[in-house]
Structures are given as structure tokens and as C-alpha cells.
Amino acid sequence: MATVDITEKTFETTLNSNDIVLIDFWAGWCAPCRLFAPTYSAASEKHPDIAFTKVDTEAEQTLAAQAGISSIPTLMAFREKVLVFSQPGAIDAAALEQDITEVRALDMQAIHHGLAADKSMAGS
């Protein structure tokens, strides 16, 4: 599966339509972003069940700001609409594969339970 550009308008739909969503926040002028792009693209071919998406931080400045992006490239992973991973900097193929393995292995029931507990504590 190829990478897909997402925008502020398609962000929520993308999260709602996919179990795992990886997002590469990048810009055309960023040399590390350009170096990471082929690694990210190759991983998208190996994992067709994951949505590999990209956000051009120049074109989508509001979305980048909402995501708290202060350094690019930044890779984020969402699972079941929950942000479970965020890391700035270009990574190599082995590190990306390790991150994907870890995201797949997460106990989402426990994470959702913890989030619910946090919400109830905040409300008391």
C-alpha cells in the first residue's frame, strides 16, 4: 500500500477508518524528511493493513500545530484512535519495523481502560 497524504479535513476520517495509522510529518525542504521517505514508503508496502499517511507541515500548518509538531520529521502512531507513539527524527528501517511490532503488540484493552480511569479521575 502506498503512503497517503492527509489533511486537516481527512485526519479524523483516516483515524476512524483504520485500526493502525502511522503519520509522517514532513516538509519538502527538510533533508532528513527526504531521507526517511523511501524507508517509510518501503514499510508501507510490507504492511498493507496499516495506514501509512503523510502530513506536509508547510501545507497543513494548522494540523501540524494541533499535533504539537516542533521538529520534523516526526512519526506518530495511532491505534484504535489513540496516540500511542510519537518520535521526532528520521529512523532507519530496522527501527521503524521495531516500532510497528511494538504498536501491534500493545494491549489496547488495558490502554482504553487506563484512559477511562484517567477521565473518571479528572472528573472527580
Image (cartoon, rainbow, N blue to C red):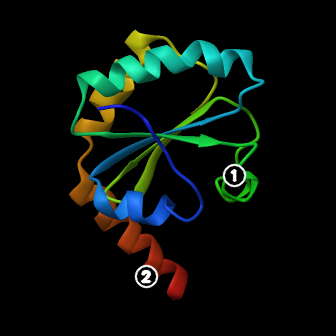
State whether residue 83 is above or below residue 113: above
Residue 19 in picture, x, y percent from top left: 27, 52
Residue 51 in picture, x, y percent from top left: 34, 42
Left or right: 121, with 31 as reference point? left
Disc on res. 60: 1
Tag 1 secondary structure:
loop
Query: In the picture, which quadrant includes the N terminus?
Result: top left
Instruction: Name which of mark 1 and mark 2 comes first in the sequence.
Output: 1
Left or right: 68, with 101 as reference point? right
According to the picture, the residue beneath numbered tag 2 turns out to be: 120
Q: Quadrant of residue 103?
A: top left
Binning the other alpha carbons within 10 Å of mark 2 as few (below 14), some (14 to 19) or many (20 upward) gives few
- Residue at far bottom of view: 124
Cα distance in 3D space between marks 1 and 2: 34 Å
Left or right: 116, with 69 as reference point? left
- Residue at 76%, 41% in the rendered image: 70
State whether residue 105 is above or below residue 19: above
- Residue at 23%, 33% in the rendered image: 48
Amino acid type for the residue under numbered disc 2: Ser
Residue 39 in picture, x, y percent from top left: 45, 15
- Residue at 22%, 59% in the rendered image: 109
Q: Quadrant of residue 33?
A: top right
Residue 16 in picture, x, y percent from top left: 34, 64
Q: Nearer the viewer, mark 1 or mark 2?
A: 1
Q: Nearer the viewer, residue 81 or 48?
A: 48
Amino acid type for the residue under numbered disc 1: Glu
